[in-house]
Amino acid sequence: MHISVKAEPLFELFGFTVTNAMVLGLIGAVFVAIWLILVAQKVKKNSSSTVKGFFTRLVLWCFERLHRTVYETIPNKKVAKGVAPFVISIFFIVAIQYYMGILPFVGDTFLMGEAPLFRSQAADLNFTLALAIITIVMVQVWAFKVLGFKGNMKRYFVNPLKDPIGCFAGFLELIGEFSRMLALAMRLFGNVFAGEILLMVVISLASYASPVLLPFFYIFELFIGGIQAYVFFMLATVFIGLAVSHDHPAKSDHSVEVKTVSEISST
Amino acid sequence: MEKIFCLFASTETGEQASEGIFGALGIDWKVLIFQAIAFGILVFILAKWVYPPILAMLNRNQKLIDDSLKAAKEASAKSEKAADEIAGQLEGARKEAEDIIKSAHKQSQQMLLDAEGNATTKADAIVAAADTRIRNSVQKAQKDLRDEVVELVATATEKIIGSRITAKEDAKLVADAIKEINK
């Protein structure tokens, strides 16, 4: 059993170290892109209201629910419209990368030297940290866009002589941004990595009984993968929603206002 | 189990510990930037070619649902209106039927009354006619009887007296007798 916290380098390409997580990550990214483009093409060709195929409908169902959640979470419709593609992509990419990690050929099955050829990209802290950094950067970008430079800065920097409590809260908010970023990255990494280790431990402990036991753990992992992807999506949406509604405390009460897709898109 | 713990323990080598926290966790800034760029490209692809058609379809479906709901509401309103109209028409028909029945009843009663009246009138007329006829018959019989009595009286008187009196005296005697009878 081979366990490594970090992704292992496989080879060098133009002076750039390619890791096993990057290999599977690339496959996963290509898969996500091709699959979703195929779904979109199928939807485009279909003039009727229903589309055949379980996975196509699953994608459509997920998209609809996530899209609605974004508009319900972010009160500002313009921001929600801009944010939706980004956060929905997070969900699909994280979910697929998570599920790629539990495929049977991932791990010790194929080796390149001593390192496994494939490793889940979500089990590479570089990927989760990159996602978290991009999310926090997006939070700031939208906050600057909506609140303006001064408005956004007021969230963190308050005159201590005028409002000492506000000044302290702003300082905490600044620290909070970094802690959110780290929490986002570590939560996903920890779950995926722990999931992979769990499967390896089950295989090792169950030995010949593993074919009977593993399906239950795979189902569990599928469930956790969906949950983690949704959690990342939801947190990214909530962080952006909170940042852009900072100067409107009344609007940031997280009250859920159910809207139809046509209402949402008409705004 | 012991083997597993040994394996876990073997992952943390002294070499990794010396790399610092980033090195130990495998964080490489170049890989990080690569991942971020790859993610950005993927988001761009999805936002450009995947989401618009899906969103268009969802909007289309939503519009269809809205239209269907609207049509269902309209149909429901129409059916309610039709039901009201039917109820109104039924009410009108019932009223009309009641009026017709009432008027027929009234008419039949009137007819009965008229028939009764006619019958009574006719019966009265018949009775009156019969009465008149009886009275005439009685009068005629009285007259005949009187004439016969006069005749008899004259005959009897002639036989008693034995001589015939003149017609003028005879008539006077009869008239007096009749007067006496009538008294």
Image (tube, coloured by chain):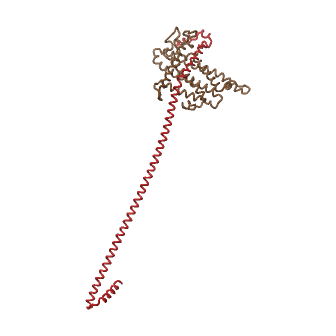
Chain colours: A brown, B red
For this orientation, the residue located farthest to the top is A113
Q: Is residue B9 left or right of residue B159?
A: right
Give the vertical position of A256 relative to A28 (above or below): below
Residue B46 figure quarter: top right
Number of marks: 0
Q: Is residue A75 left or right of residue A39?
A: right
Q: Is residue A33 visible?
A: yes
For this orientation, the residue located farthest to the right is A161
Q: Residue A109: image x %, image y %?
A: 49, 12
Q: Is B30 or B92 nearer to us in this picture?
A: B92
Q: Residue B4: image x %, image y %?
A: 53, 13
Residue B45 figure quarter: top right
Q: Is A247 or B41 nearer to us in this picture?
A: B41
- Residue at coordinates 50% horizontally, 12% vertically from top-left? A108
Residue B157 figure quarter: bottom left
Q: Quadrant of the C terminus of chain A?
A: top right
Q: Residue B98: image x %, image y %?
A: 43, 53
Give the vertical position of B2 relative to A45 (above or below): above
Q: Residue A127: image x %, image y %?
A: 57, 17
Q: Is B11 or B150 nearer to us in this picture?
A: B150
Q: Is residue A193 visible?
A: no
